[in-house]
Image: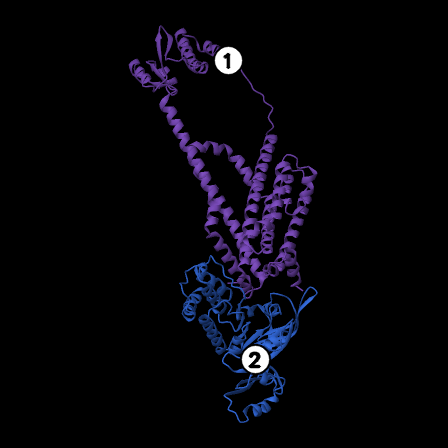
Chain colours: A blue, B purple
Amino acid sequence: MLEIKNLNKKYGDKQVLFDIDLIAKDGRIIGLIGKNGSGKTTLFHSILKFVKYQGEIKINGHDFSPADYNQIGYLPEERSLLQKLTIYDQVRFLASLNGLKNQETKARLDQWFDKLQVKGKSSDKIKTLSKGNQQKVQLIATLIHDPSLVILDEPFSGLDPVNVDLMKKVILELKKHGATVIFSDHNMGNVEELCDDIIMINNGHVVLNGTINEVRESYGLTRLFIRTDKSKEELAQLPGVEEVHPLNDGSYKLILTDQSYGPELFQILSSGQYIRTFSQEPPTLEEIFKLKAGGKENE
Amino acid sequence: MNKTWIVAKETYLRAVKNWSFLLMVLSPIIFILFSAGIGYISGKNTASAFESSTSDKIGLISSQKQVTASLGKQYKSYDNIAQAKKAYHKEKIKGYLEIKQENGQLHATYYSDKSLSAEEKQALQIPLNTIQQNKNVIEAKLSQKQIQSLSKQVIFNEKISSNKAKDQKEGQKFAKKAVFYVLLFGLYFIVLTYSQIISSDIAKEKGTKIMEIIFSSMPGENYFDGKIIGIIGEVITHILIYVISGLAGYYILLKTDFFTSFINQAKPFLNEIMANFWSWSLVFVILDIFLFIVYSAICGALVNKAEDANKAAQPLTILVVIGFILGITFANSPDNPLIVISSYIPFISSFTMPLRIISGDVASWKIFISAAILVIFTIVSFIAIRRFYPRLVLQTDETSFFKRIKRALQSNK
């Protein structure tokens, strides 16, 4: 379990993190979202003791100690392997730093090769691997010692959809085995699909914190998806409708000023008519992200 | 195994297993062996060619036992003139000497196409005259007393004012100077070579951004310790290979006839060198190598690409060159103010203080102060750089050099 209380970080006079609170329980996946430069990587670096900070970070109830290093698996944002080494030599060195014996590393490496469908042999040099396979090797190096706290900085970037699915499977397995996983991603679809909790940082401040459903529902059921014979202009005249967005399949997404307009709109649209679709939903995570990140309110 | 030692072992093995290390270490040895081999072969060929073309031996034909006993070693004896003539025509001898006795008088006749040199004539006449005199004494039938008075010779004494202590002192001074030059050149080449290697290795590592993964597994300070230990191991291995090769070469030469007498002659000097090797100068050199290694690491951490590492290590290169030039230029004037001042400045003191030490004019307390400054500076530098290094090595964005340093300092707050 990871607990962060009142975390503040300054670079000179510039404060980049403000009073961050976070609790990441065992067996939970936490999505860390935010714009580029919002402070996500600084938060990761603070957890990993790369930088000094003010505040409290506890791992499994105690302050960070040297023994905790072996409990952490970290995948940085950029791919970073020594190109001239073989896969085995690279993974062996990193695993040995996390207390794994060479024999054990060898055995586990074979299992991970199968699990992630890495093309190549452990004696191949890193530079001979494709970008995707290098990324898989880096993930193996991050997880081979069975860490209980896994920090993944944009783990899906640069991966094709097949490998994204493989990566997601691995993350869900980590959760199943009781590990705490924190990952950052700009793809809100991935976050919604995988995460139990999300925390959003904007300009160093936590602006969202909670489970996915809690966060979404806190914005109310202000998205109305309908399929009707009415035109866009007619829909825009309806009470409580702020915006009308035609969708590709012929339906519309209406943005309501308040979720309480839903029943009234249903009455209007259904009187004497058959409505093929009428669904009132909270905003998507992506919409909330854009809203909170200071972009347009709706899209 | 302790994580620091894992890093040290990995750094060391990666370096010494690398082909470039082997090439760097072995190329001077191969060059020396190759040059020595070429020299040996060409020398041998020249000697045998000279031997086969001309002979400086002289044949000797004499029935006089006294003559053959006295000259047999320097001259090649033949039973008769015909044999000697044959050997002369085959150019096995450059001429032949016939020595006969007629009426108690020795007659020596030399046959050749070239006359004997004055030295050769003298070397021949002295033993022949002695033989002739012995014969004269016997023929004159002199009494014992007469023989004794005739055999009196000039008493010649040589009184040379010798100052053994002075000679010994000169020898020691020469040996100390030799040690100074060995250490000076050794320090220069080690520091120059390794400052480039270390800084580019660190920059390369930083460029791959693997440091974030490593520092998530261990404190950056401990990684730095391991890295430095591994590099020191690499330098020690490099030096050891040369020392072992040198010793092996020494013992091999000792077994060859050509060098044995030369080495035996030089042995007291070599012993003097070995005795002077374990001195304060060596302490200065070892400390300086360590200091340069630590600073090379931080220079490498300042840049993001291996190709920029040489530029980053440039200040160190300049310091090495300054120290080396001072050492060479003022080798014979250790009292020069530049040498005196620089012998207290870390980085350069290891080039100049040994110069003052071998002159014997520097007080022990001054050596101690210079060493203390170097030790304190090295320790403080190591502690500061060790702390600073992890923060700096994580700054991989393409910002300006000073901004990176500023941010690294700020991340400690």
Q: Which is nearer the eye, B113 or A235? A: A235
Which quarter of the figure has residue B399? bottom right
Quadrant where the C terminus of chain A is found in the figure: bottom right
Residue B198 visible, this angle: no
Identify the residue under disc 1.
B153
Measuring from the top left, give residue A266's x and y in whole percent: 56, 90
Q: Residue at x 56, y 70 (%)?
A: A68
Does B356 appear above or below B287?
A: above
What chain does mark 1 sit on?
B
Label 1: which secondary element: loop
Neighbourhood count class around disc 1 (C-alpha, 10 Å): few under 14, some 14–19, many 20 upward: few
Quadrant where the N terminus of chain A is found in the figure: bottom right
Measuring from the top left, give residue B85's x and y in whole percent: 31, 15
- Amino acid under label 2? His
Measuring from the top left, give residue B78's x and y in whole percent: 32, 17
Which quarter of the figure has residue A114? bottom left
Name the disc covering residue B218, or none: none
Residue B214 visible, this angle: yes
Q: Which is nearer the eye, B140 or B167? A: B167
What chain does mark 2 sit on?
A
Does A49 appear above or below B60?
A: below
Identify the residue under disc 2.
A245
Question: Between marks 1 and 2, how big is the CA–CA gap?
Answer: 136 Å
Q: Nearer the viewer, mark 1 or mark 2?
A: 2
Does A176 appear above or below B154?
A: below
Measuring from the top left, give residue B251's x and y in whole percent: 45, 39
Q: Which is nearer the eye, B360 or B141? A: B360
**Furthest-bottom residue in this view:** A272
